Image (cartoon, rainbow, N blue to C red):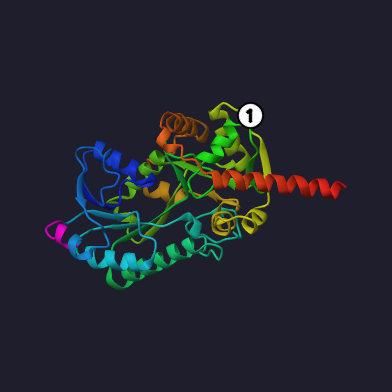
Amino acid sequence: MKALFIGGTGTISTAITKQLAEQGCELYLINRGSRNEALPPNVHVLQADINDEELVAGLIEKLEFDVVADFIAFVPSQLERDYRLFKDKTKQFMFISSASAYQTPLSDYRITEGTPLSNPCWEYSRNKIACEEYLIRQYREHGFPITIVRPSHTYSERSIPLGVHGNKGSWQAAKRMLEGKPVIIHGDGTSLWTMTHNSDFAKGFIGLMGNLHAIGESVHITSDETLTWNQIYEAISSALGVKLNAVHVSSAFLDACSPYDFKGGLLGDKANSVVFDNAKLKRLVPEFTATIRFDQGIKQTIDYVLAHPELQQADEEFDTWCDKVVGALESAAAKIRG
């Protein structure tokens, strides 16, 4: 198989790139080269900014692919560019959308690919929906061979997956756990969520590549394991070797008093219970099984992050904000008690 990835070094795409390289795929990446040092040696890098359409057109002039996948498209104009570049260059074009595009709030907690797409809380999700609609038109009107893939919360060894964190990543929340400080969990922590290790996601994605039955289809790829946010935070604290000091706070309150986009990230996503039905993926890729349980995967992540100080980015603003929220709740409770 001959494939081209736009991106290829992010949380999701890194695992796919690695597995394809191990399988002997002739793989090309288009990116700006900022994170290419860890790429397998048999991956071909076309170093360019994908937005430089003329340069990219020149780089791929004599190339054709079985699969082209864009991991970094977020608005329709970027897919319009992709269509111009690759409409005659590939047998399959794969777009990485988002499971946050599904109906929010849900009318049924069980999500299938037939669940309506609607998210009034998050512009990111609405843009992904618009991207999907553009590609579906190209498929229907021009036969552009698309496959739409919807990941949910996918994590790797480089970052601890949490619900409430600042703009600099999740390390500061983990640091609060290590220091015994109160750690904020949105809601009462009992809403349902799904965490998927990127190596499991990669198995499903690779199974869709070059799969004629996936043309024209939308498919989500997630683990079958369902967890509460309380269980997620307990697993993280256990991997850190500390006791969790949890403080539960309404998602609406967090959105109202924070400098962060919790309207999108919480109200439009993580505050909602989701359970994914992966029957369609397993019909298209019968060998797919997500095998990394969260308590196992998060242990690998914690070990890696603790061994790499460069991933431990401090966020004093978030730390101060957490203290203010916890203090405000304690003051309010004391005032009500009289």
Residue at x-position 30% and y-position 54%: 69
Quarter-of-image position of residue 64: bottom left
Residue 8 percent across, percent down from the top left:
30, 48
In the depicted view, which residue is nearer to us: 237 or 95? 237
- The magenta stretch spans which residues? 57-63
Rendered view: 153 above or below 68? above
The answer to whether residue 145 is seen in the rendering is yes
Q: In this view, does 69 lie to the left or right of 289?
A: left
Q: In this view, does 108 lie to the left or right of 314?
A: right
Residue 11 percent across, percent down from the top left:
39, 45
Q: Find numbered disc 1 in the image and state the secondary structure of the residue it sits on.
A: loop
Quarter-of-image position of residue 73: bottom left
Residue at x-position 65% and y-position 44%: 323
Question: Which residue, given by chain and number where applicable, does mark 1 sit on?
Answer: 243
The answer to whether residue 164 is seen in the rendering is no
Residue at x-position 30% and y-position 68%: 80
